[in-house]
Amino acid sequence: MTTMVNDPRTLHQRLVEQPRCTGLALAPDGTRLILSVQALDDEGVRYVPELWEVDPAGERDPRRVPGSRQGDFAPAFAADGTLLFLSDRETGEADEGPGPSLWSLPDSGEAAWTAHHPGGTTAFTAAARSDTLACTAALLPGAADARAHAGLLGRRRRAGVNAVLYEVTVDSGAELGPAEPHTFVLGRDASPVDAGGQGLEGAGDMALAPDGSLVAYTRAPTGAAPDTNTVVIADATTGAQRVTLSRPGHLYYSPVFTADGTRLICERQQEETYDSEWQVTLVAIDPLSGEETDLLPDFDNWPWPGRAICSPVPGDTTLWFTGDEQGHRPVFRREPDGTVTRLTASGAYSSLCATPDGSTLYALRSTLDSAPQAVRLDAAKADQDPTPLRTPGDLGPLPGTLTEVHTTGDDGFALRGWLVLPEGAAAEHPAPLLVLAHGGPQGSWSDWPWLWNPWPFAARGYAVLLPDPALSSGYGQRMQERGRGEYGGRPYDDVLALTDAALARADLDPTRTALAGWSYGGYLANRTATRTDRFRALVSHAGLWNLESFQGATDMHAYFRKIFGDPRIHRERYDADSPHLDATRLNTPMLIVHGGADSRVPEAQSRELQHDLRRQHVPAGFLYFPDESHGIEAPNHLCLLYETVLNFLDHHVLGEQWRRPELL
């Protein structure tokens, strides 16, 4: 195992303890750059948010924001340069109840309590050129405003009631509780008791026009049309709706107004069905007429464009966005005439910010061999390398190198994946191989992962293949077409094709291999368990096993029902792709990992797999985290995940004695 000199910790321990950079906020004058960081608390048992200040010039070391505390999060700037954030700090008002409040922090001085909503505020945004704020917070059914909501919360608490009556289908993104999200608008001098604003209808993402006159938000899907939501543009003072826009089979996300307020830019997503591919684009909506324009009609990189940022210069319709492309997530610039230019040569970018003149961008950049850090970019230069800024945290040297693997699918389509090679891998000492399948299936191995990071395995001597099979993003619309309706077909074949290409290398050992995956990757691990015995061990984390019971229980029921169909009518789709139907073929040792609070892939999927493995007398373990959801969030749990999986692989792939983790 490779470790840092004089550092007794394993790499996965250092990985878990590493501060995580999660977001950026730039002051209106471009002089302050605030970084959101997730760091271990004093006991080392959970991650807590912190606010750090990064020097935009890259000359000074980063520092904790003066006046901030652990627990402050979601930074943004008001038009006058005041730093705003959410926090669970004590407000001094006993009757306000728990939950995050909105706080403000000037350049010098103490933080001031700005607004509170009973039960807490979940998100907020500030107008670019006015003192108007918009917040997302919840109201219980029957509560007309924040004061009535507080009364109902108190009555439920005193009665010891946490029951919920659902009158519509609980679907993806819904909180499993009775309250519904609303958007509230308030001025900076509004009363913090009732959030000072007009409650609008149930809302998700939101944006304010720069002058604060309009608010836009997305209304959640209804039970009647779970694959369709609505964009609402309303008067920010009265809440009166001016424009409502929806499109059957489409969802809108991440609204943002242009600098002059004449257009609203949104992501528009057409979700996958059995007969059509997943498609994502950016659209512009006229806030007066509601007319919608596709901004990327001919962009076939299929980059799954993220939240756009608009030029801060009024009248300039330039915008920037990120999107997957060939194992990277570049920054793209769209000119007013529709021309799209890729600005970055490599890496995965997020959290874009533009300077007031639109000449410079700041972003977080990561790769599969470097954790996220703040960087500076020229806002117009093509295929550039960024200027790194001094950022908190340093994992230290990694135990190996990163390269690529290329091959073709059975249809001639060009396939690629990343390959992590451990130190010392050579023809004389070939390394064992772990194939690690990503989730999604729409997604790509492009940025630094905290969950299922390849480097702890490289530190133990494993090479790690990170394949992008059919249905992965960043390879054009054809990559979606070739995987449509074949959850366990062509994607599985592509993973094996890339595995064969990797094992053609002399420095990898084809007799010592394993495959692991999380979510959809866990499904591919389960599919592999019933299709081949070429691997010595398999790990399935939150994987789908019985597609019929899964699509009836997941929080994304409507989405998966569109893909798989009614099992009473489209039996052939389940027969083709549900691994549980081939349970008698199980014979490879498996480790199952699942969280008890997982609503995306309910834990019953793994329970059923475990029962089938036992019936087939296959060696199997079940690593169960009762309080975790679809991922693993707690640092100690994440450390146990890596330790258990590594010991399982060492036992079955390398033939070493099984070592049960001490805390298990």
Image (spheres, rainbow, N blue to C red):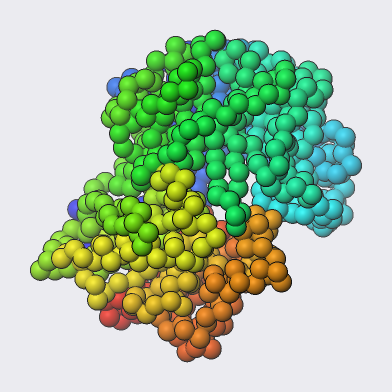
Q: Identify the residue shown where x is 82% and y is 20%.
A: 238
- Residue 471 in the image: state x and y as whole percent: 47, 54
Q: Nearer the viewer, residue 277 or 160?
A: 277
Q: Quadrant of the image for the N terminus?
A: bottom left
Q: Identify the residue shown where x is 24% and y is 48%.
A: 397
Q: Nearer the viewer, residue 67 or 655?
A: 655
Residue 462 vertical position relative to residue 125 in the rendered view, above or below: below
Q: As drawn, is 553 to the left or to the right of 322?
A: right
Let me know if residue 95 appears in the view.
Answer: yes
Q: Identify the residue shown where x is 60% and y is 48%.
A: 271
- Residue 56 in the image: state x and y as whole percent: 37, 21
Q: Identify the residue shown where x is 59% and y is 77%.
A: 608
- Residue 22 in the image: state x and y as whole percent: 47, 38
- Residue 194 in the image: state x and y as whole percent: 80, 28
Q: Nearer the viewer, residue 504 or 414?
A: 414
Taking the view exactly as shown, the residue that stands out farthest to the front is: 411
Let me know if residue 632 appears in the view.
Answer: no
Q: As drawn, is 369 to the left or to the right of 624?
A: left
Q: As drawn, is 87 to the left or to the right of 518?
A: right
**Would you identify the image quadrant in which residue 73 lies?**
top right
Residue 1 vertical position relative to residue 137 in the rendered view, above or below: below
